[in-house]
Structures are given as structure tokens and as C-alpha cells.
Amino acid sequence: MVNIMSEQIPPQIQNQLVRFQEQQEQYKALLLRKQQFEVEAREVDKALQECTNLPDDAVIYKSVGMLLFKSEKAKVVAELTEKKEELELRIKTIEKQEQRLKQQLEELRKLIMEQVSMSGTGPASGS
């Protein structure tokens, strides 16, 4: 089937289709990474809310690998706040990349469609 397609589709369009598929994969990977950061940000936010509801002298244990360490509330709140800000920044960066890649995909899709219709290799032409 690939050989039949390669005989019917001009090389330039084939190259653009490959580029389009690669960009789609990049887009999917970007969305997955964004989703992972969003889940982590929600977990950090929930932990931060729980910590701020505790009294200042509350005993807090922080997980480091497989161990738990006793820590001060203020230190844990500061670390969680910093982590939350870092995750929000990463999410915003990914959203910008997502928009740029989405625009590139749409432009490439339009270009491919134009070239397919001009070359007569579309489904309406031929056998």
C-alpha cells in the first residue's frame, strides 16, 4: 500500500506529510507533558492548602525518596510554593509551544491540501 501511495503522491507532498505526522507526534507528546505537569501542580496545590491549614507548631514530615524527614511548616510551605510557581511557569511555556505547534500544523495541513488539489492526486482524481 505504501508503494502504491508513493507512486501516486509527488515526493514534495510525501515529505510534507511525513513532516506533518512528525509534528502531530510532537504535539501529542507536548500535551502529555502538560497534562503531567498539571496533575503534579494540583497535587502540590492540595499539599500546600493542607499545610497552610495546620497550626504553626504542627509536626510535618517530608518525603524524600523512601524516607520521611521531620521538617518545619514554614520551610515546607516555602518549598511547596516555589514548586507550584515552577510548575505553573512550565505549564505556561508548554501552552505557548502548544499554540505555536498547533498553528504550524494548521498551516502545513492547508499547504498539503492545496498541493494535493493542484496536483490532482486527491481521492476524486484517478481510478
Image (cartoon, rainbow, N blue to C red):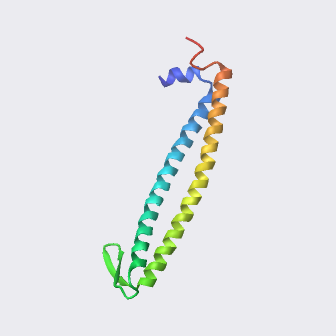
Q: Nearer the viewer, residue 41 or 104?
A: 41
Left or right: 60, with 75 as reference point: left
Q: Nearer the viewer, residue 20 or 124?
A: 124
Residue 65, image x, y percentages? 34, 72
Q: Nearer the viewer, residue 1 or 106?
A: 106
When the figure is inspected, residue 65 is found, relative to residue 118, above or below; the finding is: below
Q: Say which residue appears at 53% left-offset and 69% top-offset.
A: 85
Asked where in the image residue 106 lies, by quadrant, the reply is: top right
When the figure is inspected, residue 126 is found, relative to residue 38, above or below; the finding is: above
Asked where in the image residue 40 lies, by quadrant, the reply is: bottom left
Left or right: 59, with 32 as reference point: left
Q: Say which residue appears at 31% left-offset and 77% top-offset.
A: 67
Which part of the image, by quadrant, shows the C terminus? top right
Residue 24, image x, y percentages? 54, 41
Q: Say which residue appears at 32% left-offset and 78% top-offset.
A: 68
The single residue placed furthest to the bottom in the displayed view is: 57
Q: Nearer the viewer, residue 18 or 60?
A: 60
Left or right: 66, with 126 as reference point: left
When the figure is inspected, residue 55 is found, relative to residue 3, above or below; the finding is: below
Q: How many numbered discs sit on the rendered protein?
A: 0
Residue 96, image x, y percentages? 61, 54
Q: Say which residue appears at 42% left-offset and 73% top-offset.
A: 49
When the figure is inspected, residue 68 is found, relative to residue 8, above or below; the finding is: below
Asked where in the image residue 115 lies, by quadrant, the reply is: top right
Residue 53, image x, y percentages? 40, 78
